[in-house]
Image (cartoon, helix red, strand yellow):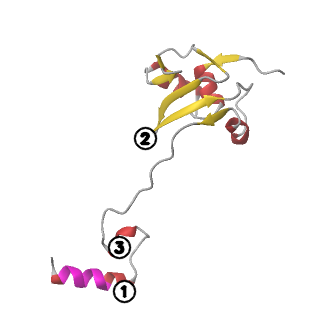
Amino acid sequence: MTPPDRLRVDKWLWHARFFKTRSLASKIVGSGVVRLNSDKISKASVVVQKDDVLTFPQGDRIRIIRVAEIGTRRGPAAEAQGLYEDLTPPEPEKTATSSHPAADRSGRPTKKQRRDLDAARRTGP
């Protein structure tokens, strides 16, 4: 079966596995937060084709995606990743905001770290 040259944007987002259900993809597109080639779209019936650029929020990130292929089905994740090229800039690395030794968030403190914390609290600032 040859892939079509165009597909509805909600169906394509679902095929590419950006959203778990097609109705969720349709809801996101319908809310007016998706851009197709820098134009806002608010209807799920808008069609996408190869080399279109989609910009949309996903979780706490803004995704920028170039459509590489249209696809014929919602297949496995490896197949879905071949449908797009991710243009989203990488997230900056998070740095520790505290100079405290237990601020690295590596789990529970060891006994030595706990003794040091207690000693620091007793002496005060």
Looking at the rendered structure, the secondary structure element under dot 2 is loop
Q: Which residue is depicted at the point 35% across and 69% down?
A: 103
Residue 61 vs 40, above or below: the answer is below
Most extreme residue toward the right is 1
Q: Which residue is depicted at the point 50% across and 28% down?
A: 55
Comparing 97 with 17, the one in front is 97
Which residues are drawn in magenta? 115-122
The label on residue 60 is: 2
Q: Residues within 10 Å of mark 3 (few under 14, many from 20)?
A: some
Query: Where does the image place residue 49, in percent across and percent down from the top left?
Result: 66, 19
Q: What residue type is labelled 3?
A: Ala
- Hey, which quadrant is residue 3 in on the image? top right
Tag 3 or tag 2, which sits nearer the N-term? 2
Q: How crowded is mark 1: few (under 14 residues within 10 Å), some or many (20 or more)?
A: few
Query: Where does the image place residue 117, in percent across and percent down from the top left?
Result: 28, 80
Looking at the rendered structure, the secondary structure element under dot 1 is helix
Secondary structure that dominates the magenta span: helix
Q: Which residue is depicted at the point 68% across and 29% down?
A: 68
Q: How many circles with numbers are drawn on the protein?
A: 3
Tag 2 or tag 1, which sits nearer the N-term? 2
Q: In which quarter of the image is the C terminus?
A: bottom left
Query: Where does the image place residue 124, in percent across and percent down from the top left?
Result: 15, 79
Q: Do the residues labelled 1 and 2 touch (CB within 8 Å)?
A: no
**Mark 1 to mark 2: distance in Å?**
37 Å
Q: Which amino acid does label 1 sit on?
A: Lys
Q: Which residue is depicted at the point 44% across and 24% down?
A: 33
The label on residue 102 is: 3
Residue 23 vs 18, above or below: the answer is above
For mark 1, what is the residue? 112
Q: Is residue 15 left or right of residue 23?
A: right
Q: In this view, does 51 lie to the left or right of 23?
A: right
